[in-house]
Amino acid sequence: MSKKVKAEPKIPYADTKISPEKTKAEISEMLKSHGIENIQWTAFRGEEVLRFLKEVDLKGVRRELMFEVKPPRIMAKKRTWNVKEGKYILVNVPLWAQAWRLVYWYLETKLKAVEWGLVSLEREMMAQITVPLPDGSVTSLGDVIERRIAEDTLAKLPSPEDEGRKVIEAELVERKEAEGP
């Protein structure tokens, strides 16, 4: 009986001829066509990030939310010429064109769902909303929730019914009557 070998998953958009720069320009245009004007592209220490701001109405209150999307790190072995060794060698290289195409289609699908009223932007992209932490650092709402799940503290979040109610913890102290003359 022969062993079944698990096939390597096919790299998404492996055959794309669209450069990362062109895809980023297309993403910017797509965001602008959905009313998102404040867009930031950042490349720092080998990491690339897309951030954008969008004003949303949350229960009658206007809020400006920042969303952050990072392309996945898609790696593949590629043959490249090694000058020192004088021969071709296999090296692991990031496939940025494929990673950004994946982000493009991811965003397009989400923005279409928002455009057609299936869901609001803040709900559809809740995991990508950035939130400041008490120590001044910034993380995503998705990371906060994921951490709560891992620590089994998700149940400590207030329930929607508790909105608008305040819970005050108090201690009942018996008062002694003052003794009279």
Image (tube, rainbow, N blue to C red):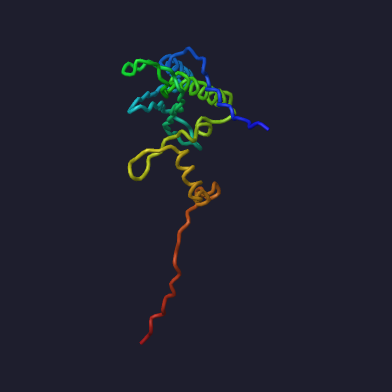
Out of 44 and 174, give the one closest to the viewer: 44
Left or right of residue 8, residue 93 in this image: left
**What residue is shown at x 48% (from left), y 50% (from top)?**
151
The correct choice, above or below, for 15 with respect to 55 in the image is above
Residue placed furthest toward the right? 1
Of residues 101 and 111, the one nearer the viewer is 101
In the image, farthest residue toward the bottom: 181
- The residue lying at 44 percent from left, 64 percent from top is 170
User: Is 2 left or right of 22, judged from the image as shown?
Assistant: right
Residue 160 x/y as whole percent: 54, 46
In the image, is residue 165 above or below residue 176?
Answer: above
Residue 30, horizontal then vertical, whole percent: 48, 18
* Total marks placed: 0
**Extreme residue in the top direction:** 17
Residue 110: image x %, image y %? 54, 26
Q: Quadrant of the N terminus?
A: top right
Q: Residue at x 55, y 23 (%)?
A: 10
**Observer-nearest residue: 146 or 158?**
146
**Residue 181 place in picture, x, y as percent:** 35, 87
